[in-house]
Every structure is written in C-alpha cells, then in structure tokens.
Image: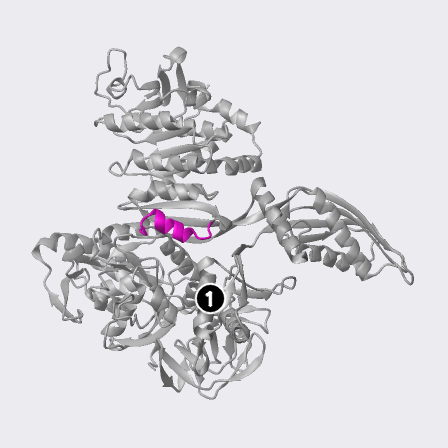
Amino acid sequence: MLKKDLILRSPAELAIGVENITDGHFGAVLSRAGVGKTGFLVQIGLTQLLSDEKILHISLDDPMEKINLRYDEAYASLVDSIGYVDPQKAVRLWESIKHNKVGISYTESTFDTDKIRDYLKSFKKADLTLPTILVIDGLDFDADLTEILEDLKQLNQEFSIAIWLSMKSHREEPLSQEGFPVQLANHEALVDKAIFLMPVDNKIEAVVLKDGDKTDQKFTLDPATMMPVE
Amino acid sequence: MIKDLKRVRNIGISAHIDSGKTTLTERILFYTDRIHKINEVRGKDGVGAVMDSMELEKERGITIASAATHTEWDNHGINIIDTPGHVDFTVEVERSLRVLDGAVLILCSVSGVQSQSITVDQQMKRYQVPCIAFVNKCDRSGANPIKVSEQLKEKLGHNSVMMQLPIGLEDKHEGVVDLVTMKAYYFEGDNGEKMVEKEIPEEMMDDAVMAREEMVDAASMFSEDLTDAILEEAEITVELIMDAVRTGTIARQMTPVFLGSAYKNKAVQPLLNAVVSYLPSPLDIENEAIDLDNNEESVILESDFDKPTVALAFKLEDGQYGQLTYIRVYQGGINKGDTLINSRDGKKVKAGRLIRMHSNQMEDVDSIPAGHIGAMFGIDCASGDTFVSPNINYSMIAMNVMEPVISLSITPKDNKAQINMSKALNRFTKEDPTFKTYVDHETGDTIIQGMGELHLEVYVERMKREYQAEVETGKPRVAYRETITRKAPYNYTHKKQTGGSGQFGRVLGFMEPCEEEFEFVNKVTGGRIPTQFISSCEKGFLACMAKGPNLEFPVTGIKVTLEDGAFHAVDSSEMAFQAAARGGFLEAYAKAKPVIMEPIMKVVIETPNEFQGACMGLINQRRGIIQGSQEEGVMSVVESQVPLSEMFGFSTVLRSGTQGKAQFTMEFSSYKQVPQSVAEEIAKNKAEEKAAKNK
C-alpha cells in the first residue's frame, strides 16, 4: 500500500507514468547544469524500485557513496511528501527494496558498454531477473556519442532494458526547429521520451518535450526535493 | 633497556595485504643494524623475510602471526609489532593495536586506500592509536602518492598532510624532498643505506614551497607558537614545525604522510626519523585498567617503575623451550624471579627467563620495565591475561572479540596425530580468541570454528607443520541459526503420574521476536507459579535455545513472556516446570513462523577495470547483493553482501575469472533470513545427514 502511495507522489509518475518508464528504447532528462537532471533520474529509478524492479544506475560524475546517498534522500523526500507515514514502516520498506539498485561509478574515460554487457549477461547466466532500467548520468552529449549510443541500443534490445540518460544543454545554444535543445535534436530518432527541466520563479518547470500524447505537458517541481508542487 | 621512556616507541605496522609491511619491516631492521642481509618476502633465495618467522608465512608470502621485534634508531628504542594484513586474522591486528602506542599505516601508492586499510583504520580508531602514513611502492607503474594522501582524507577522514614530495615516480623514483628541512634526500649504496642530503632540484622548488606552506598551515592548528611565527612573519624553525606536527599526530588530529619504496630501498630512514619524532612515547599515552576489587572502576596506569606491576599477555607462541608469552608492561616492571598474579584466575606465577625478541632470535634481559614489550618463558596463561603485583587486582579492559561464523570437522589420520592435534588445538584456542573448538557429541567429530575459510585452513596447516598432526577435514559448515518471525502463544501443562510422586507444572504466555539473543519476562502475579519455580521456567526455555526444534541450529532473537500458570502442592518441582517450559516453547515455536538465518559477509573485490563486469557477475551468481562499484584509476572496487555459504572456494573462482589479478576481502556483516528455496535445501541436507547417522 505504501509503495503505491509513494509511486503516486513521484514526479516521474506525474510526468511520464510508471508503466511508461520502461517502454521504448531511450528516455532523456535535459536541463542546464545544476537544475536537477540527476535528481529527476533518481526519482525515475525510485519508481522502479517501488515497483519491485531492479535498476542499474551509472554515474560518470558521482562516486558510489553519493549515488547511494542520492537515492536515500530521494526516498526520504518522497515519504515526507505524503504526510505522516509510520517511520519504522518507511525504513523497513526502504531496507527491503534498496538492494535492487546497483550504483556504478565510472569516469568518462573508463565507461565501457562491454562491462555493462558482461554484468547483464551474468543475470541471464544465473537465471536472475534482469534490471528493467539502466540510468546513465553524466554522458557528454557535446561529444560524438554515436558509437556508445549504438552499443546502448544493442543492450536495450538484447536485455529488454530501458535506458534513461541525462543530457546537459546550454543556455546560449539556439533550439532546433522542433524546439528541442541541440543535444536532443542530434539523437531525436533514438529518444522516445524527453523531459526538459528549467528554473522558473524559484521553482522548476518540467516540460515533456517528447512522449506521444503527453508531449508539451508541464509540471512544477520543488527544486530542493524534486517533488511536485500543487 | 632504555630507561628514559621519552626515548621508547612501541609501534605497529598495519596495512592491506601485499602493501609491503614485511618488506618495510625488513628494511627497518637492516638500516638499524639488526640484520645484515636483506631477504625478500617471496625472495628467490627461499629464505623469506626475517619478520615472517612462521614457516607457512614464508611459503605463502603473507604475515599470519605478529612477530615482535626490538631495534634502536637515533638513541631511541623501537619495539615493532608486524601485524597480519588479511581480514581473517584481524584478531591479531586488534591484539597488537591494543598494546601499541602508535602505528605506521602503509598504503600502496598505486592501489591507495583499500578495503583492509579501512578495517585497520577503524581498529586504530577504536584503540585511539595515533598514526603516521607511509605511501609505499612509489617505484611502481601508476604510483601517485598525492592521490593516496587525498584518499586518506576522503575515504578515512584523516587530516592527512604531505611531509615529503617524491623526486620522480615509477621507475624514475630517486628520493624525497623533506618539506620540514627543505632538503632533498637520495639513497645510495647497494641497499640504499647511504642517505645523501642535497639541495632541492630546481624544477621542484615551486611545488615544494607550495606544499611546505600547506603543511605548515595544517601544523599551525596545533601550535600557538607556530601560528604566531606565521602571523609575525618570523622565522619558522624546524623545531616549531616538528613540535606542532607531533602534537597533532598524538592527538589523532593529523596524519603526516611520508613516501618511498621499501623494496627499492628508498626513504625508509626518513620514515624511521618520523617514527621517533612524531609517534608518541609510552608517557604520551594514557592506559586504563579495571580494578576488580573496586566495582571494576577504571584506573589510569602510570609508566612508573616503582608502582605495582600491570602487564598484558598479548600473544603466545610455542617454542622449543615451552610457551613464550609476549607481554606489554604498562606499570611497574617485571624482574627475573618476581611473583605475579594472573588476575583472570588468581594463580601465582613466577617470572623466570625474560627475553626481548628479535623476530625468531632471542636476547635475554633481567627486567622488562613499564612501557616496554618483551616476552616471558614458562608461564601458563591465555592470550589477553593480565599479570599484576600481588597487592593489586587489576585487569586490562577486555578486547572486542567476534563470534566465529564458519566450522569444519577434523579427524586425525592416526593415533599419534590424535594426541598432537589435542596439543595443537589447546595452543591455538589459547592464542586466538576467535578460534574455537568442541567435540560434537552426536558424531564424535572434533569441530573447529573460525572467522573464514582461510583462517581455518591456516590452522589445519599449522597442525600439520608445527605439531605433525595430519587431519582430514570435512566440508566447511556455515553457522546457521533459527529464529521466529511472529508472536505466538503457548499454554502447556506438563503432567505425569507414573507411580510415586508425580510431576505437574503449567505455563502460559507467549513468545515474540526481539533484538537480543534471548529475553525472559516474568509477568506471573498472585503466586500462580511459586517464585522458586520461575527460574526453572526460564531455564527450561533457555535450554530450548541451544538447539532449534526444526533443524537443530541454535535459536536466537526470542523474547519469552510468562503470564500465568498453575502448580500442584505435592507434584510440582523444578524439573516439572523446566519440562513444562520446554513443552511451551515447542508449542509456541511451531506457530511463530520459524525461519533459518545465515551469516552474510561483506565482500569487497578489488580488480583491474577490465574485469569489473565479470566480478560483479560472480557475485550475482552467488546470491550476492551488489551495493555498488567504484572505479579508482586502473582498479575497480566492487562492494557486496554475499551469504557465507556461497563463498566457499571463491578465491579459486575469482582467480580464474580475472587471470589472478583481482583480490577480495571478506568480513562478517550480519545474519539474514535464508530464502525459502535455500531453506528447503538445508532442511533436506539435514534430514539426509540425520538418516545417515541413524543407519
């Protein structure tokens, strides 16, 4: 019951829909530096954990401890957002689901899709349930990522794993004809869902740039917690 | 013996396995003229390093038991305890830290702060041991001592401060720049024994000035004089800096970082200078004992030769002249012929031959004064015993010892082995509190218990080599436990009338899960069960905890509440209520959803980056939960929690999966419920075993 309540409060549920998160190939969260891409990606991962799914969170910026800390804090924000919850119950739930997350920290030079493939293969070998999403935070979309994205696409198909990426945009860059930041426009065909975060009056506005019927919907989030503001 | 305690240092050398502890100790002994030839740990000469005195240690290239040795440098006496680096032998590390005043934490300049460094650091914190760091292996490819110093800050929370800069790294490592004296030091001669002072190379001057400023700034936190000198732009003398660094180090507020390469004979002498300059003397450390005659009040011990003696036995060895007991004297002193009391059992002992050890060579001495480490012959005692003068009854505070998590049955191959095995087990259990042994009365097997597969393996090997006791080993067994998961009531009447006086007792209440091993709550009112039988009920319940009703594993985490009952004026007895409690326990236990718990180990793998995915896969295949993975330079660290039962033979699998390039450490984390499928498998195996026994 608590799991359902928490999912319903999640900004990821609001903007994307929990079942929609794992559909398709690539999802992207875009914003300028420091607006909240990582926080939003963590909320996406959290909805999967609350759905008893496994996730793999790769960061090219944060060390392992920080990834874990981000999830701890995001869970706490989610719990706080629904008013009173028996604290012991909340802790027990987190203890039971947090082990379904594996955080891996790479540097840009050591990130290698083969290592991820090796790891995912071991699930199959041991007959274990595969993670449903792979979050990759910190890839530099100003560089040429064609090869990496091709590899990731193969992983997506081979292991039926949805891939969510962060894309850093820049204030001074003009938008494409469709109104997309250039980082998304360059890989438009690959990305099924895209959320753009921008600061507006001390809040964050999440705009669905790409996601079928949901496109162009807007939501307001609290910048400190990434929780929806009513 | 040096009487001026200001000139005595009792130090340990602690680090991750293969960081070069034994090599460094060997070099220290060479430079201090204790040995005249350097042997490598896994040298081609087959001799092995002096500090690895146990044959098995020499063969495996690891240090198992700590060897104490005494040496002298710059008019100071230094007692060195070489400690083991593998987690399975952590009790040895803890024991040596207990008797040390300071430590040198060795770190590898390539691998940096590794998992074992973290464990050792936690132990140092527990015993408040001040330390200096030595970043070793600066000659290796990928060496980066500055990064390692940063890791000390980030991973271990030390206020690490570089005291030296390297002159060249990897194969160009030539020496060090001392930031206190602002001189460059090079090490010449066949074994680097000639320390040559030169000016700092020009190209390094700017870096050295900047690093010195940082160091002086950090040190100034511990000295007003130094702060004043900086503010007044007065001359900053070497003495001012050294005093400040020493104060910060002893207060555990600062960790000075030194660097070099023990293997290549670079910068070991400056490290010895640092030991003497910055680590505390026995006078700088406050040691406590408990007064057993005074409500175990804590007493501060003084390194005063005239006070009553207090000494701790921290290590035992079986030598050709009988038991050798390593001791640290905290107060008073032990002279040849002194009568001492072992405060554990009150037995009188007479100090016979006293010696000072130099690894496996002995030097006879007449006394071991306070503040010193030495050894006694011919004393029968256990490790951790306290020896005191007859007029006091102090005990050094008990050491933190963990319960064993793995067991192995051993069977002697012949009669001779049987006798020797008993001798060996007797010795090992005295030496190592985490090593236990008992006889399984059902099978007649001798069972040994310990902290890991390697821990037990080493003892089996030692039985063979040191005691000529060849034993056959069974399969390692995990120490499973049983517990309950929900509250359940009991209402049981024990009633027997078989002629003569009968038996009657009734108990009523409930059991529920709890955090403690066992808890008993008596809520009986109005004399429904007479007071004299309440303790019988508790005994009856407690007796059931030893062997679970389902699978005969020990039961833990149960709180039993006794609410009501009944008795008979004639037929009730202690025995009847014990039996009633047993019946009540069985009744409630069956309804309380019992489960099996298994030990979960924290497993940390350190692997070259290319094998990271493969290592994570290996954990996945073992019911392991990966907590995360972190890349650090060329190496990756994979942290996980894995059931102990899945870890047997893991070292072989890891070796073959990573071309022998990865290593792992493992330590007990917690007990967790086993999944249903595994529980069924355990139950099936247990049933088969039982059937085989009954045949």
Q: Is residue B317 above or below residue A117?
A: below
Q: Residue furthest left?
A: B202
The one nearer the camera, A160 or B556, is A160
- Amino acid type for the residue under numbered disc 1: Tyr
Residue B248: give x, y in percent of width and height. 32, 60
Q: Is residue B437 in view?
A: yes
Task: Indicate whether B351 appears above or below B549.
Answer: below
**Crowd around label 1: few <14 · some 14–19 · many ≥20 (10 Å):** some
* Residue at x 52% of width, y 72% of height: B421
Q: Which residue is labeled 1 in the image?
A: B459
On the rendered structure, is B668 left or right of B373? right
Inspect the magenta stretch and tell me whether residue B321 lies in it.
no
Give the magenta-colored segment's residue range.
B647-661
* Residue B50 location (% of width, % of height): 31, 73
Name the quadrant containing residue B253.
bottom left
- For the point 33% across and 75% down, which residue is it? B6
Q: Position of residue B303 (x, y in %)?
A: 41, 76
Q: Chain of mark 1?
A: B
> Outermost residue, bottom direction?
B337
Identity of the residue drawn at 45% across and 30% down: A46
- Where residue B211 sits, quadrant-wise, is bottom left
Mark 1 lies on a secondary structure that is helix
